[in-house]
């Protein structure tokens, strides 16, 4: 299966909105609010909407407050929803649809919801999931690997350095001895010192820290390439690092190259949605309105696709 998201403009505009400094959801009277506003209040605790991020949008629409003020591909910002498709990569059939706020956390989190729903409804469990880098976070990759789903997804990695020094990828992981080995052959062992300050030492968020001995780093001939501004080299390792390695190993296979080509089928569906079906802007308000339009559009696309996969039988003329 493959998954991706696309921004669809909401039926809202900036002129009828409030900046985040002045917005207060608690001041809304639910009994006097329109339907779309009541739906917004009902989704404040949902992972796909209000609970997806603590960051407040720059502007909030009065007519459709659940829509997200954001921009696509460095273009102008507008109010929108994310339309998420989960498809069968072999035939391009849409197996599930989800609507969320247009932020990465909500879009990625919807993956779990959709895969669980597809399993419950159709008893479908993919051998592999194809997606772009936004879905390649450690927790998401770990969730997939735990469920025996091969992540054909580029790893989302921020460990790279732009100063020319060695990155974490240059260090070899020794799982047997729970340590990293630097290019010079020295070990970085897990740092277990206890601190009175909880913000120091272990993060407590599934991340372990590994550090080389100070006396070794100070005399190392490669210190300038490793840690020129520190006494000793330190490396952080997430608990999902094994899953990230699984995804990295898959990225070096021929099947991964095929998967990246199959991922274009999702993009083609979104192009058809906007250019042929002309769903570039929603006509209904609120999360429920967006969900209805997305489902109807996906149904139309599936009927078109299934008609090609299972053509109607020929009728023979009677003499």
Image (cartoon, rainbow, N blue to C red):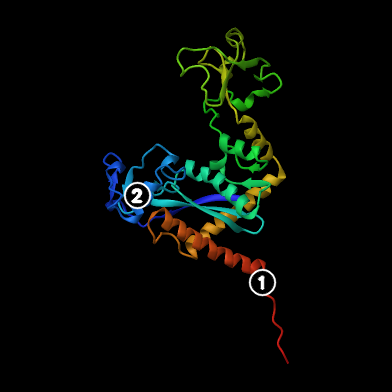
Q: Secondary structure at mark 2?
A: loop
Query: Between 96 and 10, which is closer to the camera in this rendering?
Result: 96
Residue 169 is marked as none
> Residue most toward the right?
319
Q: Say if 73 sits above or below 310 in the image.
A: above
Q: Position of residue 111 (x, y in %)?
A: 55, 46
For the point 53% across and 65% down, the residue is: 300
Dot 1 surroundings within 10 Å: few (below 14), some, or many (20 or more)?
few
Which of the marked residues, 1 or 2, is nearer the chain's N terminus? 2
Q: Which residue is mark 1?
A: 311
Q: Position of residue 182 (x, y in %)?
A: 65, 19
Q: Say if 128 sits above or below 90 in the image.
A: above
For the point 72% across and 84% down, the residue is: 316
Looking at the rendering, which quadrant does residue 52 occupy? top left
Query: Between 92 and 181, which is closer to the camera in this rendering?
Result: 92
Looking at the rendering, which quadrant does residue 56 occupy? top left
Query: Between 302 and 161, which is closer to the camera in this rendering?
Result: 302
């Amino acid at each position: 299966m493959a998954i991706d998201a696309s921004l669809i403009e909401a039926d809202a505009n900036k002129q009828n909105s409030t900046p985040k400094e002045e917005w207060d959801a608690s001041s809304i009277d639910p009994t006097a609010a329109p339907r779309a506003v009541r739906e917004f209040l009902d989704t404040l605790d949902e992972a796909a909407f209000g609970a997806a991020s603590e960051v407040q949008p720059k502007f909030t629409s009065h007519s459709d407050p659940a829509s997200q003020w954001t921009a696509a591909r460095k273009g102008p910002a507008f109010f929108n929803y994310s339309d998420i498709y989960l498809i069968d990569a072999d035939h391009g059939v849409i197996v599930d649809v989800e609507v969320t706020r247009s932020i990465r956390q909500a879009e990625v989190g919807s993956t779990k919801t959709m895969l669980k729903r597809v399993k419950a409804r159709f008893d479908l469990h993919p051998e592999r999931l194809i997606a772009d880098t936004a879905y390649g976070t450690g927790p998401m990759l770990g969730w997939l690997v735990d469920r025996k789903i091969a992540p054909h997804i580029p790893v989302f990695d921020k460990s790279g350095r732009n100063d020319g020094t060695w990155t974490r990828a240059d260090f070899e992981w020794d799982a047997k001895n729970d340590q990293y080995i630097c290019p010079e052959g020295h070990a970085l062992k897990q740092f277990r010192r206890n601190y009175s300050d909880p913000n120091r030492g272990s993060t407590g968020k599934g991340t372990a820290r590994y550090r080389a001995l100070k006396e070794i780093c100070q005399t190392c001939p490669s210190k300038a390439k490793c840690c020129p501004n520190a006494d000793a080299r330190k490396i952080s390792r997430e608990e999902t690092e094994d899953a990230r390695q699984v995804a990295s190993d898959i990225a070096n296979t021929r099947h991964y190259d095929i998967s990246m080509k199959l991922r274009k089928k999702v993009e083609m569906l979104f192009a058809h949605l906007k250019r042929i079906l002309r769903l570039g802007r929603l006509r209904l308000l609120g999360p429920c309105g967006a969900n209805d339009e997305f489902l109807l559009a996906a149904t139309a696309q599936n009927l078109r696709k299934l008609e090609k996969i299972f053509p109607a039988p020929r009728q023979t003329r009677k003499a």
